[in-house]
Image (spheres, grey):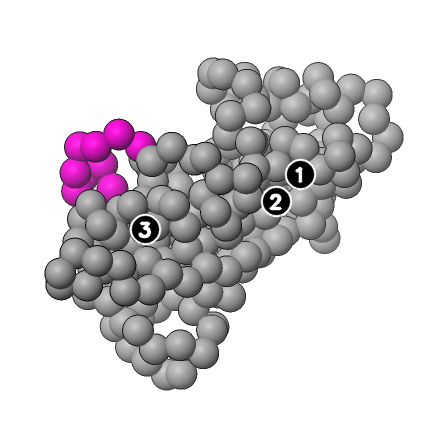
Amino acid sequence: MNGARNLFETLVLASGNRGKYAEFLALLPRGVTGKLLFAPDVACVPEVEETGETYAMNAILKARAWALISGLPSLADDSGLEAEALGWRPGVRSARAVEGSDADRNRWLLSQMEGQENRRARFVAVVALSAPSSEGELLWTLAAEGVCEGRLAEREAGTGGFGYDPLFIPDGYDVSFAELPLTVKNQISHRAKALQNLFAQNWIP
């Protein structure tokens, strides 16, 4: 960030997931913003439909939409789990792999992986940041990707995190994301790396 401080007085996180909001509060680099707002607390509008075919497309869709809705710089992400044995699925459809809860999707993933010797997997995230002008038009949008390599466990473990965290064991560790202390997860996660890459870019808003 070229030594910049307080880049934004306020940012909106374009997500309806409170677990993700709590994670972003912990992950945002110091000096980026004085206040991170949770989108549903800003405006009561339907969630932005994720029609993109890539993480970047979906993250940018959400960041741009919320920048226009709120009139504030908006941060959004799209992320997914990719299993090598499944042809890198569920990928961009991770949150919509099956209807239901996180637990339902974890059970689905375990059923898909049954009998698979290759447990290699990775979490991928793209974070997008979009800013509006005072006239209500978009000024610019930036995006960056982060990847965390690992493997899938044969059963769920841990109560922390959300999504597929209880099944994902990052490289270099013997426990799942859901079992790792937050201080550790927040250093190595795909979302942490995406944010680091975003704000390490040579740009000044």
Mark 2, secondary structure of its residue: strand
Label 3 to label 2, Cα distance in Å?
24 Å
N-term-proximal mark, 2 vs 1: 1
Q: Would you say residue 23 is visible in this rendering?
A: no
Q: Amino acid at mark 1?
A: Glu
Under circle 3, the secondary element is: helix
Which class describes the residues within 10 Å of circle 1: few (<14), some (14-19), or many (20+)?
many
User: Which of the marked residues, 3 or 2, is nearer the chain's N terminus?
Assistant: 3
Question: Would residue 24 be visible to someone looking at this image?
Answer: yes
- Look at the image and say whether residue 120 sits in the magenta stretch: no
The residue indicated by pointer 1 is: 82
**Residue 8 x, y percent position in the rendering:** 24, 67
Q: Which residue is mark 2?
A: 123
Q: Position of residue 110 (x, y in %)?
A: 69, 21
The outermost residue toward the left is: 135
x and y, in percent, of residue 93 in the image: 55, 31
Mark 2 in CB contact with mark 1 (< 8 angstroms): yes
Residue 42 is inside the magenta segment: yes
Quarter the N terminus occupies: bottom left
Q: Which residue matches tag 3?
A: 64
Amino acid type, residue under disc 2 in the picture: Phe
Residue at (38, 32) in percent of width and height: 49
Question: Which badge, 1 or 3, comes first in the chain's sequence?
Answer: 3
